[in-house]
Amino acid sequence: MTGRDGGADLHPIGNAPVVILVRPQLADNIGACARAMANGGLFHLRLVAPRDGWPQEKAWRTASGADRLLDVATVHPTVADAVADLHHVFATCPRPRHIVKPVLTARGAAVELRAVSTRGLRAGLLFGPERAGLDNDDMAQADALVRFPLNPDFMSLNLAQAVLVMAYEWWTADDGTPPRTLMTNETAVATKRSLENFLTHLVDQLDACGFLRNLPKRPGMVRNIRHLFQRGEITEQELRTLHGMVTELAIGRRRRGRMEGEFEA
């Protein structure tokens, strides 16, 4: 029996690597791994000798909608059987072992996995049991090892976290999202003309109220004001707000009878 309710409409995206959980112990962790896989566009899940058998209802409850990955997950008696149809296999390895193999970071592994995928070859990622990780016989099935460059004084990750790291690196290795954007919602970044109009308005009112009355220092003060507003991508809406503020300050000054000459030295 499973706790399936349909979940998200997930499907394979390109020639993505297979995730292979070796002797996973808890159904909750298998479900959490499926959730992490779905975050990074991974779809194919294989289970090697799950301790409590398969399927298990708890896995669907912790998958948070990644049901389809669990629905089509396959069970294998050995690692050799699980990787038999693959061309390249990378094994996550949290601790140094007496093995001579290439060792990649998660990011480096993702780059190589993308290269393998582009060539039309199939790849897999091995993740070991929660308690002890992969043993030497498991890693003998792999072409390379993957280690995450984390705090050397605390490198402990649970199974789903390890899968998420690789899923994230796989996804971002081919993702075109710019590293920095400005959320402008319903407005837009102001043009230099709009900004210049505002700065002219501002400086005119600063002259009128006497803020720039020190003539020797005035050029430098105006430059500093310009630098302040040129520093970032101010939006059209923000400029309209600032225009309104300056206008209201000027109106308030006139209503109080504070004329230009009042501030002269």
Image (spheres, helix red, strand yellow):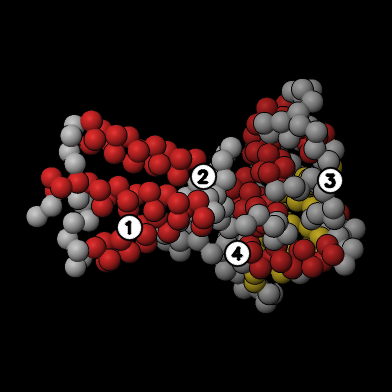
Q: Is residue 26 left or right of residue 152?
A: right
Q: Which mark is residue 147?
A: 4
Front-most of 135 and 214? 214
Q: Residues within 10 Å of mark 2 (few under 14, many from 20)?
A: some
Q: Is residue 85 left or right of residue 34?
A: right
Q: Residues within 10 Å of mark 4 (few under 14, many from 20)?
A: many
Q: Tags 1 and 4 in contact by the CB under 8 Å rule?
A: no
Q: Is residue 218 left or right of residue 131?
A: left
Q: Residues within 10 Å of mark 3 (few under 14, many from 20)?
A: few
The label nearer to you, 4 versus 2, is 2
Amino acid at pointer 4: Arg
User: Which residue in the structure is indicated by mark 3?
Assistant: 12
The percent position of residue 114, horizontal first and vertical second, equals 77, 63
Q: Earlier in the sequence, mark 1 or mark 4?
A: 4
Q: Earlier in the sequence, mark 3 or mark 1?
A: 3
Amino acid at pointer 3: Pro
Which residue occupies 68% across, 27% down? 61
Secondary structure under the numbered disc 4 in the rendered image: loop
Secondary structure under the numbered disc 3 in the rendered image: loop
Amino acid at pointer 2: Glu
Amino acid at pointer 1: Ile
Q: Tags 3 and 2 in contact by the CB under 8 Å rule?
A: no
The percent position of residue 100, horizontal first and vertical second, equals 67, 77
Q: CA distance from mark 2 to mark 1?
A: 18 Å
Which residue occupies 24% across, 63% down? 218
Q: CA distance from mark 3 to mark 4?
A: 26 Å
User: Which residue in the structure is indicated by mark 1?
Assistant: 225
Q: Which mark is residue 236?
A: 2
